[in-house]
Image (spheres, rainbow, N blue to C red):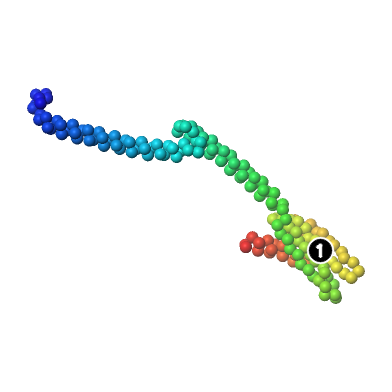
Amino acid sequence: MNIFGFEIPQELILFYSVIFCLVGFLFAFIALIISIRVSRRSKKILRDGAGHDITEAIVNYYKKCTEIMDHYNQAEERLKRLERETKACVKKVGAIRYNAFGGNNSNLSFAAAILDGQDTGFVLNGVYSRQQTTTYLKPIHKGQSLFELSDEEIEAIKTAQLNYKRSINE
């Protein structure tokens, strides 16, 4: 065969044609494999009602992410509100029994401290004697009282603080 003034054997043209076809089939096979993989990935993305095409799926996923962020922000706000509210809740409780007058060995007198997280609350002191029982309530603000505290009331406050520390460390 004569091409551009050159004599080229027909076998050589046939050989190059076959090589060209094989390379074309190889590229087609690679393209088929790639398209199958992309199709599988897109089916994974589009399942669960995400949409019929990739754009719709992306929009749906964006909406879901926005909803999740909204729920997260709401939960964060609730947590902060609960943390503020729990500061005023009773957290520390301590009580001791003691014998107020030493004679009857009954240990029927008591001192109880009821405090929040900042050691604010009150101490309740019940003094028992044979003729009567007297109860005193003294306010506590940040571990201190405007009223003079007895040794038993101070011990009740320390017991409440210690009980709280133990419960946190468990």
Q: Quadrant of the C terminus?
A: bottom right
How far from the left and from the top, in percent, is residue 95? 76, 65
Q: Outermost residue, top direction? A: 4
- Residue at 46% x, 36% y: name it: 46
Q: Quadrant of the N terminus?
A: top left
Around disc 1, counting alpha carbons within 10 Å, would you say few (fewer than 14), some (14 to 19), or many (20 or more)?
many
Q: Residue flagged by tag 1: what amino acid is it?
A: Asn
How far from the left and from the top, in percent, is residue 118? 70, 55
Q: Outermost residue, right direction? A: 131
Looking at the image, residue 83 sits to the left or right of residue 57; the answer is: right
Looking at the image, residue 74 sits to the left or right of residue 90; the answer is: left
**Vertical placement of residue 30 versus 121, above or below:** above
Q: Nearer the viewer, residue 5 or 52?
A: 52
Q: Nearer the viewer, residue 52 or 137?
A: 52
Mark yes or no: residue 139 visible: yes
Local secondary structure at mark 1: strand
Mark yes or no: residue 144 visible: no
**Vertical placement of residue 124 versus 31, above or below:** below
- Residue at 71% x, 59% y: name it: 92
**Vertical placement of residue 129 versus 71, above or below:** below
How far from the left and from the top, in percent, is residue 38? 38, 37
- Residue at 69% x, 63% y: name it: 163
- Residue at 43% x, 37% y: name it: 42
How far from the left and from the top, in percent, is residue 55? 46, 32
Answer with the quarter of the image where residue 26 lies: top left
Please give the residue where the numbered disc 1 appears in the rendered image. 125
